[in-house]
Image (cartoon, rainbow, N blue to C red):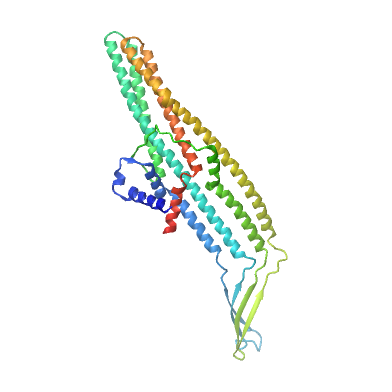
Amino acid sequence: MFKVKYALLALMIIGLFTPQAKAQSTLTLEQAYMNVLAQNPQVQGYKARVMAAEGHRLQESLMPNPEAVFEAENFGGDSPRNGSDAVEYTLGLEQQIEIAGKRSKRERVASIEKQQASQEALAGIQATLARTKAAYMRVAIAQERLNLADKRIALANKTHETVKKRISAAKSADIQHTKADIEVSAAEVEQRKAAKEVNIAKTELANLMGAAMLDAGISSDLTILPDGPERESLIKALEQTPMSTLSQLSVLRENSVLDLAQANGVADPTFGLGVRRFNEDDGTAFLASVSVPINIFDRNQGKIAEAKANVLAAESDRQAQRLNLTRQAEELLQTLISVKEEVLAYQDGLLPSAQKAYAQAEEGFDRGAFSFLDLLDAQRTLFDVQDSHLEALASFHKTKSQIDMLTGEYAPIAASVFNANEEE
């Protein structure tokens, strides 16, 4: 854990505080994570809420303050008690003593609430890291889409030149020249759309890192498709997610609240000790007192009944949470398997076939074996296959980032935020 923490700290120093950081040409995924942990407003909010929960726990662990008592009696009355000759002054302290373990039970509730705040923070930070990974891959895919758009323009221009030569040689009709012009214009429109998508994706990633814009590019090998987890290991990992821990802590909290409610039904005595001065003879005397509320009407029975009902509700919510997480994990795993098969089908079969078909159509068109419509159809098919491949890639990486959150891939990174705070 210490190695992980100091490695992350070193990355933060290198990524955030060196002059070269702003001028870097590429941004790694690890650097993006560190920027998110250091600058994302939501992450800072999660950290603040954990600190607030610790303050609440500290407050609940404190004893009630003693009360200072001052009394003046027997003055301003009828003779012989007119004036201040017969005044009696009392100065003392009173202390309420909590019994039935109220303070320890109250502190336990607050301690569990702090654990809940920590788990909520971990869940939120891991979700933010998952969005960061998805946003990072979205930038990478958008850059690839723009790269393909540039190639499409070059391809459309090449086709346009080929058509022009054939028209000059009186081998093609003018309408083919018009269609070639349309293809070039369409490719330019797609290029502008791709450039806008890059800007939008970079803005999303920059916002997650607490910045307005991202100057750096992304370097990622889109041909590498990481494997998903086995179903058994995924289901087992669900028990360790912050969401599962939160539902367990909720049951513990409600049981602790019930214990506290039952303890609050027991009256707390108040002890007093003081000294009294008598003006009549300048004498003094000590006094002591004990007061205990009589629990006749209010025995905290309403809070006890409420707490019992909340225990049942928390147990039901925990069961529902387990079922919901299992269902979500099953759906994500099946989606990942399906999308990965789709991506591999494009990479291993459809893309090479589409590229081969276009090359054959181009060569055949040059020889006069194929019509311009054949060439245009092959070109559009290639473009469509490339688009569908990138869409499948985006879906794969988005799903993989969500599964990684369930399997705890981001847990060490998220926990490093609180480890650093404890070290401070």
Residue 377 in percent (x, y) is at: 40, 16
Residue 36 in the image: above or below residue 147 = below
Is any part of residue 215 visible from this angle?
Answer: no
For residue 165, which quarter of the picture? top left
Q: Residue furthest top?
A: 170
Q: Nearer the viewer, residue 101 or 292?
A: 101
| Residue at image point 34% right, 17% down | 180
Residue 103 in percent (x, y) is at: 59, 65
For residue 195, which quarter of the picture? top left
Residue 81 in the image: above or below residue 391 = below
| Residue at image point 58% right, 41% down | 324
For residue 93, which quarter of the picture? bottom right
| Residue at image point 70% right, 69% down | 294
Q: Residue furthest right?
A: 296
Is any part of residue 423 visible from this angle?
Answer: yes
Q: Nearer the viewer, residue 335 or 254?
A: 335
Residue 64 in the image: above or below residue 170 = below
Residue 265 in percent (x, y) is at: 67, 63
Left of 116 or right of it: where is 383? left
Q: How many marks?
A: 0
Left of 328 or right of it: where is 28? left
Q: Give the quadrant of the C terminus.
A: bottom left
Residue 390 in percent (x, y) is at: 42, 29
Q: Nearer the viewer, residue 85 or 18?
A: 18
Residue 191 in the image: above or below residue 292 = above
